[in-house]
């Protein structure tokens, strides 16, 4: 049963019981109506308490029902709320925990609301690309005032119930047993003569509503240009202010129906479920016992090691930091301290927290100090020989059952695991730079990595607030393996006729945070050069453009050398198109092709994005990623792919795989077409009429 019904001394208690978060799916909605009707028909019942079992009052509408017939099947949420509001017997919403979206809208339809402190209250619909569609844009401003409501609706951010205690939303915020308090409250109001108060009858009072709405509109225009929902939130609130509750409600409904169909909403919902799905590994049961991780060690206090250590410290987990030399250790600690000092300056960290965090680090030069570590993350130089030394040493000192992780970005995790006598305890934890900031963590599953090791690190990733995605072992794992194809195309296009600024502008207009050439200048062109040199040896069969090597031969390694694909001025990170580079590109094209052609922005975007998609399809086929949404999560959280497009695989579904396949075949028939080996898995999906996401 999605809803339970009991009575206690003249009060009916309707309890939402639809785990995990009491989503308001069809059966829950029907159950509420049934409960309200039963209470009306029972002469002994004088009042009704509406509450939730488990970890939420309600997390809102059931998002999985969106765009299915169930979403619009009666009783819809709007109908349920109307029935609750219209109940002759007073309805008291008792909110012990999360009341979000439709959950809060339902509570706003009740005549009274009482809450426990600590309950998360929000209208987070905007984060899913929609707006509150069951009266939230109309009732919340009437409950807590225009400004506070608009802030909550446009940001979607949760506010704790105690902060709203005097807002007009709650009749009481009570400590102790909430149900007891709700029952007592219900008895009290049940004894009163009706009609009972309705939020819809309250007035929105504001000295300058039009001015404030305009202010909100300007703020949203600056931050949400690719998302329609925040704008519609304001429109809907405004409609209620100007035209009254009923017209506002009708307009809100219209906007909701339109928004739920948008690609932006689809993308945001895909990301919501994708993030949660990423933590589920098909052959690792949810109840796999976890290893206890209370002490972590990090080896190497360089760029990555320092950032990795900060993640654990920020989560209150003590870290032993090991280096080979005192100077390197001091340098690493100083960088960590500097990062925290910067956070204090920005007001993001309390000054006293700085020393508390630093105190969680135990610096050391001795492996003896790693004996008690439950997890050891290696972040030393990217050389197999150095990794070998480290892992052999770890095998000697680490306690049995300790998880041994490598942050390698290019080396074979199975080879690293084989340096130990416990390959089942070895896993790749591929953090992204800066490791204390970037959300993405690729968890690299070796062929012998134990299931409980995987389950433990996935759980730990949540604790340190990372989006963890499992990747099998292959060159570049999910993210870098795909980006290699993207960069290959970018370089070919320079040879064929484009210039760096055109390529960057086109893909940035598509929504990427930074185009490939600005990105390469930031990371250092020498890094890619070193990787390519290795690839030329290992894979002489693969055709790479040599144009980037020419740039490196000119000593143009990027921002750090004052010039790369672009020119840079001292102290200024702006990328200025470079005449010498553009001339070099022109000369290079002539050398190898004899001519250059005009390349359209559309071609640039297709070649870059479809290169990702095609490689992503191969990654899926090989089982390197277990689902398409995992690949999208990698790109959304680690590579600046535009969130409103939902990641490369969802984008491909939106364009239609049939169209993607046709474009790939077209490019494969052109110069440099050998870089396009159509993924058989993609062709198969087209033949079957499926997309990556069903
Ligand atoms: N519908 C369907 N499933 C939902 C859901 C919802 N509204 N909210 C959460 N879930 C599912 C999650 O997908 C997850 O499923 P899984 O276990 O199969 O992976 C499970 O519930 C638990 O979710 P979390 O892992 O996120 O659990 P937490 O305890 O960390 O967080 C939460 C709970 C704060 C409720 C969080 O899940 C959340 O923010 N949910 C989304 C809330 C939301 O956006 N509500 C608005 C919905 S739209 C709406 O109401 C429209 C209305 O205006 C008409
Ligand atoms: P780095 O050069 O900044 O730091 C490496 C540190 O390891 C140095 O401080 C060095 O003194 C120390 N070190 C070397 N040998 C050691 C040993 N035997 N024992 C203990 N410490 C030792 O390098 P960076 O960039 O931090 O890279 C580390 C690892 O992280 C590499 O495997 C790299 O591929 C990987 N990585 C790097 C990313 C980046 O953007 N820099 C991104 C993701 C992974």
Image (cartoon, grey):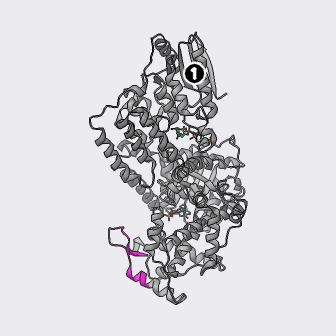
Q: Residue at x 54, y 78 (%)?
A: 492
Q: Residues within 10 Å of mark 1 (few under 14, many from 20)?
A: many
Q: Does residue 387 appear anywhere in the picture?
A: yes
Give the percent coordinates (x, y) of residue 514.
Answer: 45, 64
Give the residue number, with chain letter if any, for mark 1: 36
The reply to whether the magenta stretch includes residue 571 is yes
Of residues 397 and 674, which is closer to you in this image?
A: 674
Q: Position of residue 30 (x, y in %)?
A: 62, 29
Q: Is residue 278 magenta?
A: no
Name the quarter where the N terminus is drawn.
Answer: top right
579 or 129, which lies in front? 129
Rendered image quadrant of residue 623: bottom right
Residue 347, compared with residue 493, is above or below; it is above
Q: Provide the residue span drawn in magenta.
A: 562-583
Instruction: Give the quarter the ligand 1 occupies.
Output: top right
Position of residue 196 measured from the top left corner of the image (x, y, whole percent): 44, 18
Query: Compared to 684, does 669 lie above or below?
Result: below
Q: How many marks?
A: 1
The answer to whether residue 40 is above or below residue 327 is above
Vertical comparison of 281 with 173: above or below: below
Residue appearing at x 37%, y 43% in the figure: 350
Q: Is residue 435 left or right of residue 279?
A: left
CB at disc 1 and ligand 1 closer than 8 Å: no
Q: Is residue 203 left or right of residue 304?
A: left
């Amino acid at each position: 049963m999605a809803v339970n019904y009991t009575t206690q001394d003249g009060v009916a208690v309707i309890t939402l019981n639809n785990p995990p978060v009491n989503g308001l799916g069809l059966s829950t909605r029907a159950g509420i109506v049934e409960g309200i009707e039963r209470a009306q028909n029972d002469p002994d019942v004088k009042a009704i308490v509406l509450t939730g079992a488990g970890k939420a009052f309600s997390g809102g509408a059931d998002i999985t029902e969106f765009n299915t017939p169930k979403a619009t099947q009666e009783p819809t949420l709007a109908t349920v709320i109307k029935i609750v509001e219209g109940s002759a017997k007073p309805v008291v919403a008792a909110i012990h925990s999360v009341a979000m979206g439709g959950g809060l809208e339902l509570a706003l339809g009740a005549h009274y609301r009482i809450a426990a402190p600590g309950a998360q209250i929000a209208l987070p619909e905007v984060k899913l690309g929609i707006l509150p569609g069951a009266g939230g844009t109309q009732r919340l401003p009437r409950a807590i005032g225009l400004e506070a409501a608009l802030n909550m609706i446009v940001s979607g951010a949760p506010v704790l119930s105690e902060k709203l205690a005097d807002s007009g939303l709650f009749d009481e915020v009570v400590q102790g047993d909430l149900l007891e308090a709700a029952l007592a409250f219900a008895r009290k109001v049940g004894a009163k003569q009706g009609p009972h108060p309705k939020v819809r009858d309250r007035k929105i009072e504001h000295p300058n509503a039009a001015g404030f709405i305009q202010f909100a509109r300007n703020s949203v225009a600056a931050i949400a240009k690719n998302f329609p929902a925040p704008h519609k939130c304001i429109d809907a609130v405004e409609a209620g202010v100007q035209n009254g509750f009923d017209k506002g409600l009708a307009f809100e409904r219209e906007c909701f129906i339109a928004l739920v169909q948008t690609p932006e909403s689809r993308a945001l919902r895909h990301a919501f479920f994708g993030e949660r799905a990423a933590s589920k590994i098909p052959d690792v049961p949810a109840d796999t016992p976890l290893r206890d991780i209370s002490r972590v060690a990090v080896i190497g206090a360089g760029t990555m090691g320092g950032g990795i250590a900060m993640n654990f410290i920020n989560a209150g987990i003590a870290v032993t930091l090991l280096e080979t030399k005192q100077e390197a250790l001091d340098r690493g600690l100083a960088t960590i301290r500097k990062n925290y000092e910067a956070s204090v300056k920005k007001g993001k960290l309390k000054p006293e927290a700085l020393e508390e965090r630093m105190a969680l680090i135990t610096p050391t030069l001795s492996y003896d100090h790693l004996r008690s570590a439950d997890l050891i993350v290696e972040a030393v130089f990217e050389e197999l020989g150095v990794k070998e030394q480290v892992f052999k040493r770890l095998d000697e000192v680490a306690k049995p059952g300790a998880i041994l992780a490598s942050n390698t970005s290019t080396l074979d995790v199975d080879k690293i695991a084989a340096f130990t006598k416990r390959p089942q305890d070895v896993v790749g934890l591929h953090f992204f730079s800066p490791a204390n900031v970037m959300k993405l963590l690729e968890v690299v599953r070796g062929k012998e990595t134990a299931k409980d090791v995987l389950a433990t690190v996935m759980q730990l990733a949540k604790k340190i607030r990372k989006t963890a995605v499992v990747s099998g072992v292959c060159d570049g794992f999910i993210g870098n393996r795909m980006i290699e194809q993207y960069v290959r195309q970018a370089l070919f296009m320079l040879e064929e006729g484009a210039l760096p600024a055109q390529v960057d502008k086109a893909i940035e207009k598509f929504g990427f945070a930074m185009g490939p050439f600005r990105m390469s200048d930031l990371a250092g062109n020498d890094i890619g050069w070193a990787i390519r040199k290795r690839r030329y040896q290992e894979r002489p069969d693969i055709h790479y453009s040599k144009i980037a090597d020419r740039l490196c031969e000119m000593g143009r390694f990027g921002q750090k050398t004052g010039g790369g694909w672009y020119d840079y001025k001292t102290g200024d990170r702006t990328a200025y198109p470079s005449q010498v580079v553009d001339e070099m590109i022109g000369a290079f094209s002539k050398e190898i092709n004899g001519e250059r052609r005009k390349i359209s922005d559309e071609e640039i975007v297709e070649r870059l994005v479809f290169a990702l998609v095609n490689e992503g399809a191969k990654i899926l086929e090989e089982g390197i990623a277990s689902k398409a949404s995992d690949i999208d999560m990698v790109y959304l959280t680690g590579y600046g792919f535009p969130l409103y497009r939902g990641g490369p695989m969802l984008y491909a579904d939106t364009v239609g795989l049939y169209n993607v396949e046709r474009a790939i075949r077209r490019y494969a028939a052109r110069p440099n077409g050998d870089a396009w080996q159509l993924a058989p898995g993609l062709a198969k999906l087209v033949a079957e009429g499926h997309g990556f996401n069903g």
